[in-house]
Image (spheres, rainbow, N blue to C red):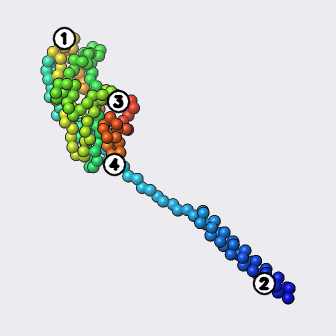
Amino acid sequence: MRKKHTKSKLVTIAILLILLSIAGTGTLAYFNDSITVHNEITTGNINIAINQVSTESLAVMPGMAVDRPIVVTNDATSGEAWVRVQIKKQIVKADNSIGDDALIIMQYNNQNKCNDNWKYKDGYYYYKTPLAANNTTAPLFDEIVFSPTMGNDYQNSTATVTIHAQAVQTANNGKTVWEAAGWPNTPQTP
C-alpha cells in the first residue's frame, strides 16, 4: 500500500510542478510582453517668395528714386510663418573699389527705418504678425533713392541691393516673431 500512496504523491507533486511551471510561464510572459508601434510624423511646408516690381538694371542719377516695393508672400498651401528680411547694399565703383553704401537710401513707408508692420532688430527686419498661407506682407520699403551727394567718382558705378528673406513656422514656435526658434544663428551673406 505504501507504493500506491507514494505513487499518488509523486503524481500529485508532478501535477503541481506542471501547474507551477505553467503559471510561471504565464507570469513570465506577462512581464515580458511587447508590442511594436510605428509612429508617422508629418511636417508642414513653409514656402516664401520675395516679390518686387522688377529686377532689371537701370541707369540712375544722383537724387533719383527707383520704385521697388519689397513684399514677402507665403506661398505655402497651409500654415502661418514668421518672416524676417535682411538687406545688404553695395556700391562697386568703376575702378572696382567699394563705395559708401549709405548713399543707397531705402525709403520706408513712414520714413522711420521701417513701417508699423516691420521692426528692425539685430540686422533683420522682422514682420511683426504671422503671415498666413497665400498672403503677402505689407511693403518693407517703397523705393530706393540714390543720394544727391554722390559725386563724379560714382560715375559708372554699380549699386546692388540684395534682399534675403527667411521664414519659420508659427505653430508651437513662440507667441511673437522675437520668441520664434529655428532662425539661423549666423547672419546670412546674400
Regarding mark 3 in the picture, which secondary structure is present there?
loop
The location of residue 46, given as percent across then percent down, is 31, 44
Report the quarter where the C terminus lies. Answer: top left
* Mark-to-mark CA distance, 3 and 4: 24 Å
Residue 152's label in the rendered image is 1
Q: Earlier in the sequence, mark 3 or mark 2?
A: 2
* Mark-to-mark CA distance, 2 and 4: 72 Å
The image quarter containing residue 8 is bottom right
Residue bearing mark 4 = 44
The amino acid beneath tag 2 is Ser
Dot 3 and dot 1 residues touching (CB under 8 Å):
no
Mark 1 crowd level (few <14, some 14–19, many ≥20, 10 Å Cα): few
Report the quarter where the N terminus lies. Answer: bottom right
Q: Residue at x 23, y 40 (%)?
A: 73
Q: Earlier in the sequence, mark 3 or mark 4?
A: 4
Q: Residue at x 25, y 26 (%)?
A: 161
Q: Earlier in the sequence, mark 1 or mark 4?
A: 4
* Mark-to-mark CA distance, 1 and 2: 121 Å
The location of residue 47, given as percent across then percent down, is 29, 43
The amino acid beneath tag 1 is Asn
